[in-house]
Amino acid sequence: MSVNSARLKPFVYLLRRRFDPGAARQAGDQIKYKGQSMRILMCGALCALGFGLAGCEMPEDQLEPVVASFNEASVGIQLNGNAMDFSSSEQRAAAIARADAKANEICSRGPNRRAEFASTRNLPTGQYSYVKERLYLCLR
């Protein structure tokens, strides 16, 4: 594997300036290396933006409904609030549909057979996280 000395020249220059402040600069060095560093910074920023946007989609298991409470008259279903905020509208609708199905399943175990959505509230679970609790009434 051969090393291209032209590619290493900017790094050698930067190291020399870092460890030897008395080293002399050449006339065109500052402009040439400033342009290269700006190009590298722009490329890095674009790559970071691309990776950041690609990672915005939430996995389905983060949006799984959890039964929080059940007393034969009502059932509380919790959804991850942060995951709901960062998911697409289709994923949010699917998570709410799964919560509705879970509430119907839980309500059918008691004397009342049908679940009807009543309200939503946000419950903090930490400084920057919360869950959305959906309350369903179990009706006949």
Image (cartoon, rainbow, N blue to C red):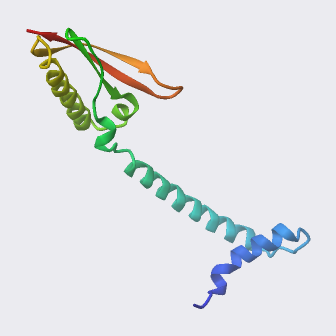
* Picture quadrant of residue 136: top left
Task: Name the residue located 34 percent from the left edge and 42 percent from the top edge.
Answer: 58
Task: Name the residue located 74 percent from the left edge and 73 percent from the top edge.
Answer: 29
Q: Is residue 25 left or right of residue 58?
A: right
Q: In the orientation shown, which residue stands out farthest toward the front?
A: 110
Residue 67 at x, y percent in the picture: 28, 24
Task: Name the residue located 22 percent from the left edge and 27 percent from the top edge.
Answer: 99
In the picture, the quarter occupied by the N terminus is bottom right
* Picture quadrant of residue 60: top left
Task: Looking at the picture, tell me which residue is in the foreground, 53 or 78.
Answer: 78
Task: Looking at the picture, tell me which residue is in the foreground, 22 or 108.
Answer: 108
Task: Looking at the picture, tell me which residue is in the foreground, 117 or 20.
Answer: 117
Q: Is residue 29 left or right of residue 93?
A: right
- Above or below — where is 120 with respect to 14? above
Q: In the orientation shown, which residue stands out farthest toward the bottom?
A: 2
- Above or below — where is 135 with respect to 4? above
In the picture, the quarter occupied by the C terminus is top left
* Picture quadrant of residue 8: bottom right
Count of numbered circles on the image:
0
Residue 4 at x, y percent in the picture: 62, 86
Residue 24 at x, y percent in the picture: 87, 75
Residue 52 at x, y percent in the picture: 44, 49
Q: Is residue 44 left or right of residue 26?
A: left
- Above or below — where is 108 with respect to 50? above
